[in-house]
Amino acid sequence: MSEIKPGNISKVSIFSILQMLFGLLLFMFSIDLLTVSMVRLNSQFAEELFLATNNPFIGLFVGLLMTALIQSSSTVTAMVVAVVASGNLSLEQAVPLVMGANIGTTITSTLVAFSFIMKKNEFKKALAAGVMHDIFNILTVLILFPLEVYFGFLSHMASYFTATFFNLGDQYDGNYNYNTLFTRPLTLWFADLILNTWVLLILAVILVFTSIKFLSTSVFKTFMSPNANRINKHIFHKTYLSFLYGAFFTAAIQSSTVTTSLIVPAVANRKVSLVKAFPFIIGANIGTTITAAIAAIYKTDAAISLAIVHFLFNLLGAIIFLPFPGIRNIPVKLATFLGKESTNSRFVGFAYILLAFFIIPFLLIYFNKD
């Protein structure tokens, strides 16, 4: 076997980093392409579905299901904001939709974990890293959803902040661009080349899974380099520094899906522990609320309030779990348990995704559609 000379280490590291950046761009493009294709298919249907959510419990699962399908909580949140801004949906009805969207967006990082399914030890850690984001959002919903339903906790707080700091009045011109990633111009250009939306959707799905595999491989190579090891220690060394990096990176690219998916290969290959990765994921949840700034385009009190709800939900989740190690370790331990069980039986992982993100939400929506 030929060995790499010390003088070539930097060249190998640079090549690995470039490969990872290409994989990241490909992944972002594929996610954005899937978002565009799903929006073109389901935009009108989604808005009609949103309008039917008089039951807050059903609204929660509608938001979850729609986000799991569209693969972008920013897009679903923006669609909900559009309906709220038009006056067809109240703020109280919209809050459960946003909560559900926060859970639905976590499916991608869980799917990334399945690229390690043939490697037992890596798969256990990868799946634990993938579902940790799910568990955090689910636990936050379990705490805040009852407070919202019975006391209007988030909606009243958001309305207060809106009236105090904004008070812009109700002016909505009906226009909105569901732009969530900087790849959108390229995505729209490519989408316009494919006239059939169903063909576009199939291509997007294929590209998502191809990019996930490529990204996992390239991230592994990058994290193996000495320079990357030093960077990892810097980013994940302290809890609050990791949290800030997660928020910053996610706000920069406007997608928690991408940043949390990058964590999965790092944890799978033992470059970052679950405990140290968790604050980064919480920070990513805060960063994704950059959608709040986009919502300001509407210049309506209701739209601004909903955007603030999105921010408050993630901020309060961070305040609940981040400061106290005992509480912070609860999602980590639950994720570790699920990862271990999925290693013993691969069926557990698949069953979790199907039940949590599709079967249960669909059945609850279907049987309560009246």
Image: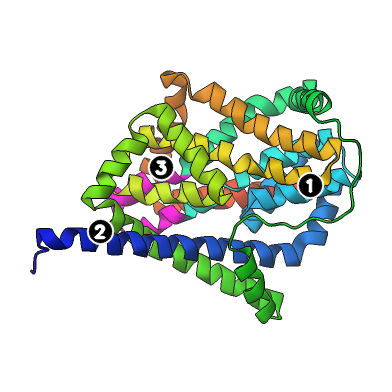
Task: Give the labeled residue for mark 2.
Answer: 13
Expressed as whole percent of the image width and height from the top left, the position of residue 223 reads 29, 51
Under circle 3, the secondary element is helix
Three-letter code, disc 2? Ser
Q: Position of residue 65 (x, y in %)?
A: 68, 50
Name the residue tied to disc 1: 297
Q: Secondary structure at mark 1?
A: helix
Q: Give the residues in magenta.
A: 112-130
Relative to 52, residue 15 above or below = below
Between disc 3 and disc 1, the foreground one is 1
Q: Quadrant of residue 5?
A: bottom left
Residue 124 in view of the camera: no
Residue kind at label 1, given as amino acid type: Ile
Residue at x-position 46% and y-position 51%:
261
On the rendered image, what quadrant is the N terminus found in? Answer: bottom left
SS category of the residue bearing label 2:
helix
- Is 359 contained in the magenta span? no
Q: 127 or 95: which is nearer to us?
A: 95
Residue lying at 40% horizontally and 37% vertically, measured from the top left: 277
